[in-house]
Amino acid sequence: MTKLAEIQAAEQRLLVKTYDRNPILFVGGEGPYTIDEEGNRYLDLLSGIGVNALGYAHPTILKAIAEQSQKLIHTSNLYFHEGQAELAVRLTERTGMDRAFFCNSGTEAWEAALKLARAHAGILREEGKQIGTKFLALEQGFHGRTFGSMATTYKAKYREPFAPVMPDVEFVRFNDVEDLRAKFSNDVCAILVEAIQGEGGVRPLSQEFFAEARKLADSTGALLIADEIQCGMGRSGKWCAYQHFGIQPDITTLAKAIAGGIPMGATLCTEEVARSFHAGVHGTTFGGGPLACAVACAVIDELENSKLLENSTTVGNYFMDGLRKLATRHKIIVDVRGEGMIFAAELNSAALAKQTVAAMLERHILINCTSDTVLRFLPPYIIGTEHADQALAALDEIFTAFESAPAAALATEGEQRG
Ligand SMILES: Cc1ncc(COP(=O)(O)O)c(C=O)c1O
């Protein structure tokens, strides 16, 4: 029995069934490559779903982990350590926010954002304003899998098995300004958006929709909350994707790339919003621990020192240009969109999208498929044009093969996990 087969059998017996894994056993990584137990190198254009912004085994991250773990891995939020203020300075300066709350994952960061919004509306009511408790979320939006996050996540498959979910959430049609206007009222405490929807299919908000959301929120004191868990931390070529629109939300959430692979989340907000929390109303044991904070500071410094946001833009544009060129030759590609290192090629067939991901995997290139037909790319920010060329050549070969054997290519139907 191979090591992989042993692990598969053990997991099958022992783990709660939440993941449908590909049969590959990864044991290491270097730069943009992850390495399996036989020493095969895979070009990871998904970065562990948006996490490994600096790729694998980046010396800056290894150094920060080594140094901090010698000093202090964990204390508790009953005491001070150096890291939270140092990280909060870096994040607030770069995002236009005033204050930070640290936690351990994306969904936790989003839960804190929802709680801030409800508490803020409560304060406004005490001050005599007429404002309710309802959240307006967007169709196709994804915010995580805990109860509040799940309730504000659009796809029914994430919510229905766990009903009843948190009430007081209404979904607005994506980029439909009229629908937003019609559903907005004094009952709303916050409008919830992703500047670029990630799992929803790499779909950017329209400038008009985003601006209208800001305007409507301002008209009542409701909050505009931007989930940057996937598209933030420099992935789009700016620290936060909302900065492409020149629109400042009241709260934003970060996770994924924030600490280069060490679990961490952050909820950032304005001074006005922060006044709705006081000591004891919210917290977490591990959140903002010394190790995660030290690594996150090191990641931010490295992104700046090595000009990796600029690289995200340059190489992302090069990659997307290449995909657009492929689209002129392969009708299977119906759209190419994105910013920096979050981009997608939408195909005209769910079955072929699924097969493309599998064929890329056979060629040792990792991408995935979301929203059935969308090939999603979330590369580490360190890739160069040579990595883009390698992936583009592989896609060209795969699409050419589909065109020469369309019947076989369409043989299987199904949905790839997003
Ligand atoms: C936009 C967005 N929000 C929230 C989450 C949830 O983050 P986590 O899986 O760390 O809980 C994700 C995860 O994919 C996400 O993409």
Image (cartoon, rainbow, N blue to C red):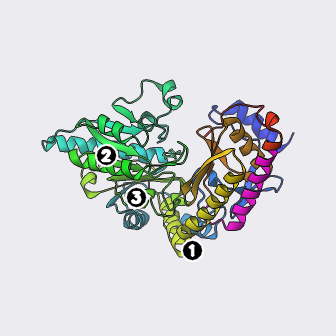
Give neighbour class at mark 2: few <14, some 14-19, many 20+ (Cα, 10 Å): many
User: Which residue corresponds to mark 3?
Assistant: 245
Identify the mark at residue 306; answer none if there is no mark: 1
Report if residue 324 lies within the magenta region. Answer: no
Q: Position of residue 71 (x, y in %)?
A: 52, 67
Q: Is residue 91 above or below residue 275?
A: below
- As measured in the structure, the alpha-carbon distance from the residue carrying label 1 to the one carrying label 2 is 35 Å
Q: Please state which amino acid type lies under the numbered disc 2.
A: Leu
Q: Nearer the viewer, residue 172 or 82?
A: 172
Give neighbour class at mark 1: few <14, some 14-19, many 20+ (Cα, 10 Å): few
Q: Nearer the viewer, residue 139 or 293?
A: 139
Mark 3, secondary structure of its residue: loop
Secondary structure character of the magenta stretch overall: helix
Q: Find out whether the residues at labels 1 and 2 contact each other: C-beta distance under 8 Å.
A: no
The residue depicted at 35 percent of the width and 57 percent of the height is 247
Q: Please state which amino acid type lies under the numbered disc 1.
A: Ser
Q: Is residue 285 above or below residue 172?
A: below
Q: Position of residue 239 (x, y in %)?
A: 46, 63
Report if residue 398 lies within the magenta region. Answer: yes
Q: Please state which amino acid type lies under the numbered disc 3.
A: Phe
- Of mark 1 and mark 2, the one earlier in the sequence is 2
Q: Find out whether the residues at labels 3 and 2 contact each other: C-beta distance under 8 Å.
A: no
- Of mark 3 and mark 2, the one earlier in the sequence is 2
Q: Position of residue 396 (x, y in %)?
A: 76, 53
Residue segment shown in magenta:
380-401
Query: Seen in the image, is 161 located left or right of residue 86?
Result: right
* Ligand 1 has an atom within 8 Å of the beta carbon of the residue at disc 3: no
User: Which residue corresponds to mark 2?
Assistant: 116
Mark 1, secondary structure of its residue: loop
Mark 2, secondary structure of its residue: helix
Q: Residue furthest left?
A: 128
